Image (tube, rainbow, N blue to C red):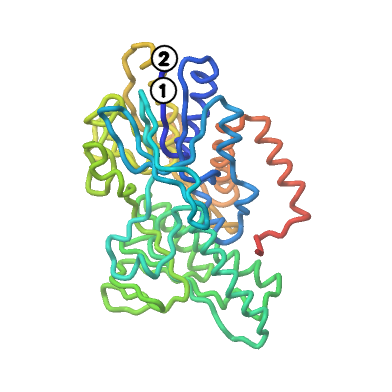
């Protein structure tokens, strides 16, 4: 029987792994590759803040899992994993309902010989009172599009009532990469929407507050990056509050632990991550306090040699360190690359390699205004980048993701097509 490899989660890492295994093991008939995801299309998660502001049209930049499977010799199954039976080596998928609530596909099980879990992470609201009810999140395309609709509705109301003096107040909780990049994109969107003359709202009528519990923005990155980012945000008119943990959220305001009340018509929570809750206790696998599957350096789970995991949903130890591999896109890419070799070696009965994370630096985009970051390499050490050069390197990250999925020539054609279409498309999605 052909070895069955099932990959759960079609994010950047899971989709790249399925594509590369399909091109090698699947094409040669050495294994059957199945990718499972609860959506029909893929959007690169680091770009969701652009979907939220309308800078990126998700309908244009999405990838069809069904088409990708056909082109790359793997199978796609639409479904959401809810359970695992390690004894019979089957995963359980929930029933899939359409918009009217009618069952499109029943609850079912899917057999595997090797299982790879790459379901990513969700935003962690830390149980903050009112956060789940009153805040928007940016974990999925649907959530990003919801924020875009709410933002656009303010401008449409102003356009319908030209006498309005309404302003828009946006509060973003969490000054990590997502919060910082969203704040800058919102500032850019305010300028572009004003240029389209939707009512009398001007850029200064959008008041953006970025709230961070830690002592500085981008707390996970070096201070030499966070300082210029903080200064740029303030130049853009973003109010930045540090050492300000949010203790409560209601319909119109947020309250910090110091008692400060911040008014906000739109509230976005972008602080912290945790793995999906269904992983807790899944099939008796070991998990940590934020639901991540605990791994060995081979990316196998501690309780089962036949189950691998990687990306944000996994706690992978770093050799020579007490910490785990950070939940970053470059880590998931490196792990996917190693798993291609690992699963090939496993079929041949060879020893599995161990994962060693290499930090190639960090880049943060401040929309069209700037970008800041550092690149790290064996020859150059750590090199600080700002401005145009940093923006070019930041854009290249998405292009590298596209090349991994489509190849070099198709990606170049897509880039050329977007450049040609610039003159016939608005700079923001306006619907």
Residue 383: image location, x then y, percent? 46, 41
- Residue 212, by quadrant, is bottom left
The answer to whether one can see residue 11 in this image is: no
Residue 384: image location, x then y, percent? 47, 45
Closer to the camera in the image, 73 or 331: 73
- Determine the secondary structure under disc 1: strand
Q: Which residue in the protein does label 2 denote?
A: 1
Up-down relation of residue 321 to residue 123 (above or below): above
**Left or right, residue 382 beside residue 187:** left
Please give the name of the residue rendered at 43% of the width and 52% of the height, measured from the top-left corner. 225
Q: Which residue in the protein does label 1 denote?
A: 4
- Residue 188, by quadrant, is bottom right
Up-down relation of residue 396 to residue 140 (above or below): above
Residue 70: image location, x then y, percent? 60, 29
**Left or right, residue 329 beside residue 413:** left
The answer to whether one can see residue 358 in this image is: yes
Please give the name of the residue rendered at 60% of the width and 60% of the height, measured from the top-left corner. 54
- Determine the secondary structure under disc 2: loop
Up-down relation of residue 413 to residue 164 (above or below): above
Closer to the camera in the image, 378 or 431: 431
Please give the name of the residue rendered at 52% of the width and 58% of the height, measured from the top-left corner. 100
Mark 1–mark 2 CB contact (< 8 Å) = yes
Up-down relation of residue 268 to residue 256 (above or below): above
Q: Quadrant of the N terminus?
A: top left
**Left or right, residue 406 beside residue 195:** left
Label 1: few (<14), some or many (≥20) within 10 Å? Answer: some
């Amino acid at each position: 029987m052909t070895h069955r490899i099932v990959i759960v989660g079609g994010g950047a890492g899971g989709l790249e792994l399925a594509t590369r295994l399909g091109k090698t093991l699947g094409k040669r008939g050495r294994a059957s590759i199945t990718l499972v995801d609860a959506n029909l299309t893929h959007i690169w998660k680091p770009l969701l803040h652009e979907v939220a502001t309308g800078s990126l049209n998700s309908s244009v930049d999405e990838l069809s899992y069904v088409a990708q499977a056909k082109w790359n010799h793997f199978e796609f199954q639409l479904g959401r994993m809810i359970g695992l039976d390690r004894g019979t080596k089957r995963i359980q998928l929930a029933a899939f309902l359409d918009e009217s609530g009618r069952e499109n596909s029943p609850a079912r099980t899917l057999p595997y010989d090797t299982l790879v879990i790459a379901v990513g992470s969700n935003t962690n609201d830390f149980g903050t009172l009112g956060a789940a009810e009153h805040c928007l999140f940016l974990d999925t395309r649907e959530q990003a599009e919801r924020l875009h609709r709410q933002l656009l509705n303010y401008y449409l109301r102003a356009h319908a009532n030209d006498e309005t003096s309404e302003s828009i107040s946006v509060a973003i909780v969490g000054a990590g990469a997502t919060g910082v990049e969203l704040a800058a994109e919102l500032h850019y969107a305010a300028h572009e929407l004003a240029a389209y003359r939707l009512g009398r709202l001007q850029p200064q009528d959008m008041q953006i507050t970025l709230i961070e519990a830690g002592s500085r923005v981008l707390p996970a990155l070096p201070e030499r990056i966070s300082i210029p980012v903080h200064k740029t945000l303030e130049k853009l008119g973003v109010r930045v509050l540090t050492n300000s943990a949010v203790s409560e959220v209601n319909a119109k305001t947020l309250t910090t632990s110091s008692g400060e009340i911040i008014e906000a018509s739109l509230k976005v929570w972008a602080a912290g991550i945790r793995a999906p809750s269904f992983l807790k206790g899944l099939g008796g696998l070991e998990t940590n306090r934020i639901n991540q599957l605990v791994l060995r350096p081979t990316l196998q789970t501690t309780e089962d040699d036949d189950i691998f995991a990687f990306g944000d949903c996994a706690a992978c130890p770093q050799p020579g360190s007490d910490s785990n591999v950070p939940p970053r896109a470059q880590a998931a890419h490196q792990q996917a690359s190693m798993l291609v070799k690992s699963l090939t070696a496993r079929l041949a009965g060879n020893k599995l390699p161990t994962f060693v994370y290499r930090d190639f630096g960090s880049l943060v985009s401040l929309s069209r205004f700037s970008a800041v970051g550092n690149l790290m390499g064996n020859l150059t050490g750590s090199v600080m980048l700002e401005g145009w050069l940093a923006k070019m390197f930041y854009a290249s990250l998405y292009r590298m993701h596209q090349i991994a999925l489509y190849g070099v020539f198709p990606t170049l054609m897509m880039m050329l097509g977007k450049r040609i279409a610039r003159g016939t498309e608005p700079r923001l999605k306006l619907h």
